């Protein structure tokens, strides 16, 4: 795999297209100083930006929750995203859309930051856990670090402060696992460090509810509807560690990682210790549907149909 950062791309920074080697923000930007900002990770499949409306809607809801006024209308921001893809001639890509509080002083006060910083980075896709993870499955641990509760800056809000997830990821690294499953403050299963999760028991799907400190994942919602279309029962409800450990199948899901099977938890096999049939069926269906223009926004004119080689 080519190191993505070695290639030069154009990055949108506050209305300008700047080379990725030179794109930068002020050291006084509160996104850097305090993690004061929000972001979205979005995928483009064959010239269609998958679930762009849903991602923009979530970004604007997050902005409202932290009293951040995004200096572009939703339509203008959508066009900026599409134009960034066109400028880079990308039709299969990952988009990172970031809005920070902007440049201020060294104090916390957001009133000192009159101009939010808007950044759009687009790049060829680098898979989250490595390309082979989907086939072999992931080894997970249950982290001792708890997901921040819903009454604090939890992952209900996709903010620039990911230290809670990073602490979980560090535990996974230290224990030689691929990723960590985090529990909420009550001890119920929440989500993984950067993905939501599903457990399959007796052919039915279970996924933790929004009040279990999870992000209201766009992939999670999409999978719930795919699963129901395929005739599976899906329950959104509290999941105990006992139920998780005794699941027949577990998978993580998110925009970047899509659907990735989990084959062990804390060293114990999940089911038969290999990707299970329900997970594989959903992965197959997901791969088909993400390319369907019905579920996304076409880049339209100016897009070059030749993907950049990785
Ligand atoms: C903490 C966390 N949970 C879940 C997800 C998956 O969300 P989505 O499906 O909207 O990409 C993400 C994605 O970035 C995340 O950071």
Image: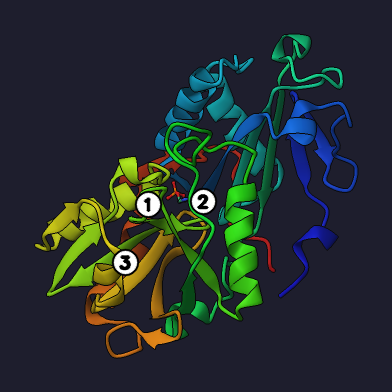
Q: Do the residues bearing badges 2 and 1 touch, measured as CB atoms within 8 Å?
A: no
- Could you give the CA–CA distance between mark 2 and mark 1, rounded to whole angstroms? 14 Å
- The answer to whether residue 103 shows anywhere in this view is yes
Counting residues from the N terminus, which is met first, the one under dot 2 or under dot 1? 2
Determine the residue positioned at 67% across, 38% down.
84
Residue 287 position, x and y percent, is 36, 65
Q: Quadrant of the N terminus?
A: bottom right
Question: Label 1 CB, ligand 1: below 8 Å?
Answer: yes
Which of the two marks, 2 or 1, is nearer to us in this view?
1
Tell me if mark 2 has few (under 14), some (14-19) or many (20+) residues whose alpha carbon lies within 10 angstroms of its own. Answer: many
User: Secondary structure beneath disc 1?
Assistant: helix
Return the residue at label 3.
241
- Seen in the picture, residue 283 relative to 220 is either above or below; the reply is below
Return the residue at label 2.
44
Residue 160 position, x and y percent, is 64, 38
Which of the two marks, 2 or 3, is nearer to us in this view?
3
Counting residues from the N terminus, which is met first, the one under dot 2 or under dot 3? 2
Determine the residue positioned at 60% across, 17% down.
68
- Seen in the picture, residue 38 relative to 72 is either above or below; the reply is below
Residue 99 position, x and y percent, is 65, 29
Return the residue at label 1.
219
User: Secondary structure beneath disc 2?
Assistant: strand
Q: Nearer the viewer, residue 148 or 127?
A: 148
Q: Is residue 267 left or right of residue 72?
A: left
User: Secondary structure beneath disc 3?
Assistant: helix
- Seen in the picture, residue 124 relative to 11 is either above or below; the reply is below
């Amino acid at each position: 795999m080519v190191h993505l950062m070695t290639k030069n791309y154009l990055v949108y920074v506050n209305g300008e297209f700047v080379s990725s080697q030179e794109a930068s923000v002020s050291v006084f930007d509160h996104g850097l100083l305090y993690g004061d900002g929000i972001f979205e990770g979005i995928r483009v499949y064959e010239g269609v930006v998958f679930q762009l409306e849903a991602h923009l809607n979530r970004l604007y809801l997050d902005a409202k929750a932290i009293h951040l006024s995004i200096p572009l209308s939703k339509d203008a921001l959508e066009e900026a995203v599409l134009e960034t893809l066109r400028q880079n001639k990308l039709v299969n890509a990952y988009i990172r859309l970031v809005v920070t509080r902007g440049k201020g002083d060294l104090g916390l006060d957001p009133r000192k930051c009159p101009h939010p910083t808007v950044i759009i980075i687009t790049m060829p896709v680098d898979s989250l856990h490595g390309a082979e993870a989907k086939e072999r499955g992931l080894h997970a641990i249950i982290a001792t670090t708890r997901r921040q509760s819903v009454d604090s800056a939890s992952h209900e809000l996709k903010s620039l402060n990911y230290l809670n997830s990073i602490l979980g990821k560090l535990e996974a690294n230290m224990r030689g696992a691929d990723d960590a499953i985090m529990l909420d403050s009550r001890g119920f299963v929440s989500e993984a460090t950067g993905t939501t999760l599903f457990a399959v028991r007796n052919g039915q799907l279970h996924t933790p509810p929004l009040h279990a400190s999870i992000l209201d994942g766009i992939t999670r919602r999409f999978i719930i509807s795919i699963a129901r279309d395929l005739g599976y029962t899906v329950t959104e409800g509290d999941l105990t560690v006992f139920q998780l450990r005794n699941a027949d199948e577990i998978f993580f899901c998110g925009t970047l990682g899509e659907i990735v099977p989990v084959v062990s938890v804390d060293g114990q096999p999940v089911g038969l210790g290999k990707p299970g049939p329900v997970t594989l069926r959903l992965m197959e269906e997901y791969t088909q549907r993400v390319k369907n223009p019905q579920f996304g926004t076409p880049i339209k004119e100016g897009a070059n149909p030749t993907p950049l080689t990785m």
